[in-house]
Amino acid sequence: MRLLIQRVNRASVSVDGELISEIGKGLLIFLGVGHNDTEAHADFLAKKAINLRIFEDDEGKMNLSVKDICGEILLISQFTLYADTKKGNRPGFSDSAPPEKAEALYEYFGKCLNELGVPTKMGKFGALMKIDLLNFGPATFLLERE
C-alpha cells in the first residue's frame, strides 16, 4: 500500500463538473493499493498518516500532526502509484490490485481515518477526477507498507 501525502491549505475533488468533496487545512492523501495489501496494512498506514508530524508548531518546526491542528483529510484512490516505468515509455499497472480489492481497501482506509478522529472526505473510486489543491510548503511525503 502506498500513500502520497500532500500538506494542503485546501483541496477539492470534482467528477463530471460536480464538486463531490472539499476540505480546508489538512492532508490530501492519494492511496494506491497493491496485490498483497491487507486491512492490516491499512490500519498501520492510517495511524501513521494521522500522527505524521508535518505541520509547524509555534517555533516553525514540523512538530504537529493533522490531528493536532484539527485538520481534515481528502482521500483519493490512485492506482498509478503502482505504475511500473522500468521498461519502455508506457507505464504498466500489473502491480496494482484488481479494482474490487482496491475499492474495498480504499473504503476501509477512509473508515479507519474517520474512526481515528480525523474528518475524512473521499473522492469517487474509479472515476476520472479533477483535483484542485493549494499545497502548503510544498510538503509531499511517500509512505509505504509492503
Image (tube, rainbow, N blue to C red):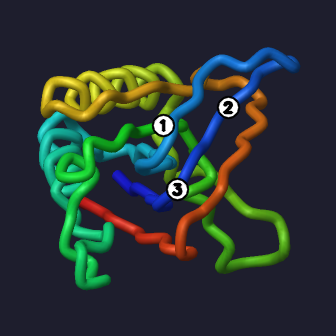
Left or right side of 101 for 19: right
Tell me how far mark 3 sits from mark 2, CA to CA. 13 Å
Residue at (58, 46) in percent of width and height: 10
Q: Assign a secondary structure to mark 2.
A: strand
Q: Assign a secondary structure to mark 1.
A: strand
Which residue is tagged 1? 74
| Residue nearest the viewer, comparing 77 with 57 | 57
Q: Nearer the viewer, mark 1 or mark 3?
A: 3
Tell me how far mark 1 sits from mark 2, CA to CA. 8 Å
- Binning the other alpha carbons within 10 Å of mark 1 as few (below 14), some (14 to 19) or many (20 upward) gives many
- Determine which quarter of the picture holds residue 40: top left
The disc, 3 or 2, on the residue closer to the chain's N-terminal end is 3
Q: What residue type is disc 2 on?
A: Val
Q: What residue type is disc 1 on?
A: Leu
Asked if the residues shown at circle 1 and circle 3 are in contact, with their CB atoms under 8 angstroms apart, the answer is yes
Q: On residue 8, which mark appears?
A: 3
Asked if the residues shown at circle 1 and circle 2 are in contact, with their CB atoms under 8 angstroms apart, the answer is yes
Q: On residue 13, which mark appears?
A: 2
Give the image location of residue 7, x and y in percent: 46, 61
Q: Assign a secondary structure to mark 3.
A: strand
| Residue nearest the viewer, comparing 120 with 68 | 68
The disc, 1 or 3, on the residue closer to the chain's N-terminal end is 3
Give the image location of residue 99, x and y in percent: 53, 26
- Binning the other alpha carbons within 10 Å of mark 3 as few (below 14), some (14 to 19) or many (20 upward) gives many
